Image: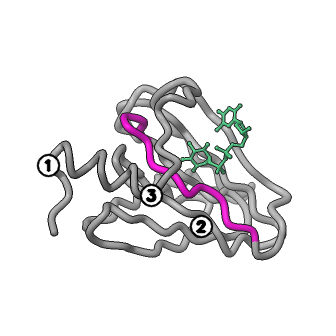
Amino acid sequence: MQVLKYAFQQHGDSRGQLVALEEFKDIPFEIKRVYYMYDTGENVHRGFHAHKSLEQILICIHGSCKVLLDNGTEKKIVSLEKPYEGLYISNDMWREMYDFSSDAVLLVLASDYYNEEDYIRNYDEFIKFITDKGEHKL
Ligand code: T46
């Protein structure tokens, strides 16, 4: 499984750093939604779902966290700890976020509006979904 992590351009000068993100330039999709999570308690695990069509980029703009990616065949753990790094998560990818530092702010850029019908929240259903599509290699 290939993990796609972007290192965004930093516009740094004596005043500090600035990162600018433009759809189709820095981000490979139209950005239809932005959300973020913070005040995530110690030992909290979030996610535990896949999306049928949504694409997202996760940026830990403050603090750090880990993301487990699982395509049904392989699993990878990615650390997010730099505010200029973005993790691309495609559709059909199970994800879990954990190990949040107490100051973590996880920003997410999403390719579509919120739609509960796009979620697969059961792991067995996820495996069935990708197997039916021919994406699950045993
Ligand atoms: C994902 C990971 C990385 C909304 O009302 N609108 C929204 O846009 C979102 C994202 C959530 N919500 C509501 C739905 C739930 O009542 O906020 C509550 C928490 O959402 P959820 O339990 O889905 O949060 P996570 O952290 O498990 O997952 C989120 C995204 O939902 C998901 O798409 O890929 O972050």
How many residues crowd around disc 2 within 10 Å: few (fewer than 14), some, or many (20 or more)?
some
User: Which circle marks residue 82 in the picture?
Assistant: 2
Quote the CA–CA distance across marks 2 and 1.
Answer: 35 Å
- Report which residue position mark 3 lands on: 123
**Is residue 7 positioned above or below 35 on the image?**
below
Residue under numbered circle 1 = 134
Picture coordinates of residue 48, whole percent (x, y): 55, 57
- Magenta-drawn stretch contains 50: yes
Q: Which residue occupies 62% across, 60% down?
A: 83
Q: Which residues are magenta?
A: 44-55
Q: CA distance from mark 2 to mark 3?
A: 30 Å
Mark 2 vs ligand 1: CB below 8 Å: no
Tell me the number on the disc at residue 13.
Answer: none
- Identified at 58% across, 27% down, the residue is 114
Q: Amino acid at mark 1?
A: Gly
- For ligand 1, which image quadrant applies? top right
Which is in the foreground here, disc 2 or disc 3?
3
| Quadrant placement of the N terminus | bottom left
Q: Secondary structure at mark 3?
A: helix
Disc 2 to disc 3: CB gap under 8 Å? no
* Mark 2 or mark 3: whose residue is earlier in sequence: 2
Between disc 3 and disc 1, whose residue precedes? 3
Return the x and y of residue 29 as percentages of the image width and height: 38, 32
Amino acid type at mark 2: Lys
In the picture, measured across the screen, residue 40 lies left or right of residue 133, that is right
Who is closer to the viewer here, 85 or 64? 64
The local secondary structure at tag 2 comes to: loop
Tell me what residue is drawn at x 49 percent, y 55 percent: 86
Residue sitting nearer the eye, 25 or 93? 93
Q: Nearer the viewer, residue 18 or 36?
A: 36
